[in-house]
């Protein structure tokens, strides 16, 4: 729920005094303007906007991008046209190219994209088309755009090699669990990515808990990503019936919202690991994504 008690914590910029080390960023996956505001007010440096978190995230609407961009926090839009694998045919790639142009035109500060070949290599042709579309759309509006490779990398045959190839494609950030089910389980691979791709910001995401953040920071990641989600309260007034593949019960058939307390606890854990004074509160064990 977005109204759980947690003191607002505005994101800081710059390294801890005297260290010269870039501050580890906190990115929150959100599905709505309300989620973006919650993330902003409790310490997020940016948000990844998507829809369908329960499906791993899908492309948000242009209207959603516009509304989230107006919240005053950098919004990076996920561009993924369907759930499932990351091997796309020509029609799907063309659709995502159009979606990239749409979300950038709607105010996205960045796009989050990815595609693989059937053999598990990075589909450089598809990724280049997506990245070029983002840059062209931003350039025509007199601004720049950031491009992140999403967790397609975790289903690739060699995540470290994929990360090392990204600077040549002009991609400066990658979201990864290190090819494992969770980022803590993939810690060694994340560290290898950091070493193999010095021009790329490695962002750890997937199954992160507050207690895991110090080890992720020590591995050299540039950012931590989490959904900080909790189920929203159902607001239906009539009888419930199942629709499609919605929940198995009325309680499960709802939507996710951004949990302010989880965002704030993640911010505190990052600040402590990163050399900032710790804010009071937090158990160190909250599940973040």
Image (tube, rainbow, N blue to C red):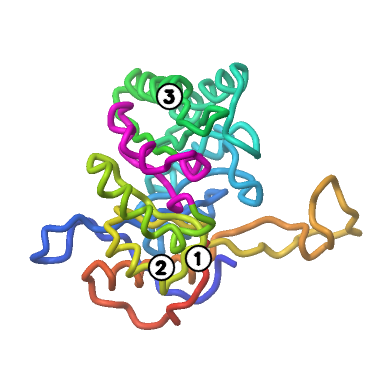
Between 117 and 106, the residue placed more toward the observer is 117
Examine the rendered structure and indicate whether residue 53 appears above or below residue 77: below
Which region shows up in magenta?
150-179
Q: Earlier in the sequence, mark 3 or mark 1?
A: 3
Q: Which numbered disc flags the more N-terminal residue, 2 or 3?
A: 3
User: Where's residue 95, x and y in %?
Assistant: 59, 21
Q: Nearer the viewer, residue 163 or 285?
A: 163
Residue lying at 76% horizontally and 60% vertically, measured from the top left: 235
Q: Which mark is residue 288?
A: 1
Total count of labels: 3
Q: Quadrant of the N terminus?
A: bottom right
Answer few, some or many: residues within 10 Å of disc 2's Cα (few below 14, many 20 plus, some between 14 and 19): many
Residue 54: give x, y in percent of width and height. Answer: 65, 51
Q: Does residue 240 show up magenta in the picture?
A: no
Side of 197 relative to 212 (left or right): left
User: What residue is disc 2 on?
Assistant: 266
Res 124 label? 3
Q: Decide: is 263 above or below 178.
A: below
Q: Residue at x 23, y 39 (%)?
A: 199
The CA distance from mark 2 to mark 1 is 8 Å
Q: Is residue 95 left or right of residue 150?
A: right
- Give the image quarter of residue 4: bottom right
Task: Of the two numbered discs 2 and 1 on the same chain, state the one appearing first in sequence.
Answer: 2
Answer left or right for 87 relative to 177: right
The stretch drawn in magenta includes residue 155 = yes
């Amino acid at each position: 729920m977005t109204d759980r008690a947690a003191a607002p914590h505005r994101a800081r910029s710059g390294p801890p005094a005297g260290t010269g080390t870039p501050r580890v960023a906190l990115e929150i996956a959100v599905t709505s303007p309300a989620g973006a505001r919650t993330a902003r007010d409790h310490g997020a440096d940016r948000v990844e906007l998507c829809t369908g978190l329960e499906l791993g995230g899908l492309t948000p609407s242009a209207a959603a991008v516009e509304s989230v961009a107006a919240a005053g926090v950098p919004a990076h839009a996920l561009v993924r046209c369907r759930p499932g694998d990351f091997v796309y045919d020509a029609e799907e790639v063309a659709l995502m190219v159009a979606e990239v142009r749409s979300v950038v035109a709607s105010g996205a500060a960045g796009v989050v994209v990815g595609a693989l070949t059937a053999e598990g290599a990075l589909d450089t042709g598809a990724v280049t088309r997506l990245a070029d579309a983002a840059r062209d759309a931003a350039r025509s509006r007199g601004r720049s755009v950031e491009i992140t490779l999403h967790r397609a990398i975790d289903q690739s045959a060699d995540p470290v090699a994929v990360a090392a190839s990204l600077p040549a494609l002009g991609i400066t950030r990658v979201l990864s669990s290190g090819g494992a089910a969770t980022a803590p389980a993939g810690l060694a691979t994340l560290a290898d990515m950091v070493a193999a791709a010095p021009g790329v910001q490695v962002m750890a995401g997937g199954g992160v808990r507050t207690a895991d953040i110090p080890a992720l920071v020590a591995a050299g990641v540039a950012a931590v990503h989490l959904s900080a989600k909790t189920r929203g309260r159902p607001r239906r007034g009539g009888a419930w019936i199942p629709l499609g593949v919605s929940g198995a019960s009325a309680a499960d058939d709802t939507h996710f919202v951004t949990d302010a307390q989880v965002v704030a606890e993640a911010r505190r854990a990052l600040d402590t690991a990163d050399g900032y004074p710790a804010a009071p509160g937090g158990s160190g064990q909250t599940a973040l994504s």
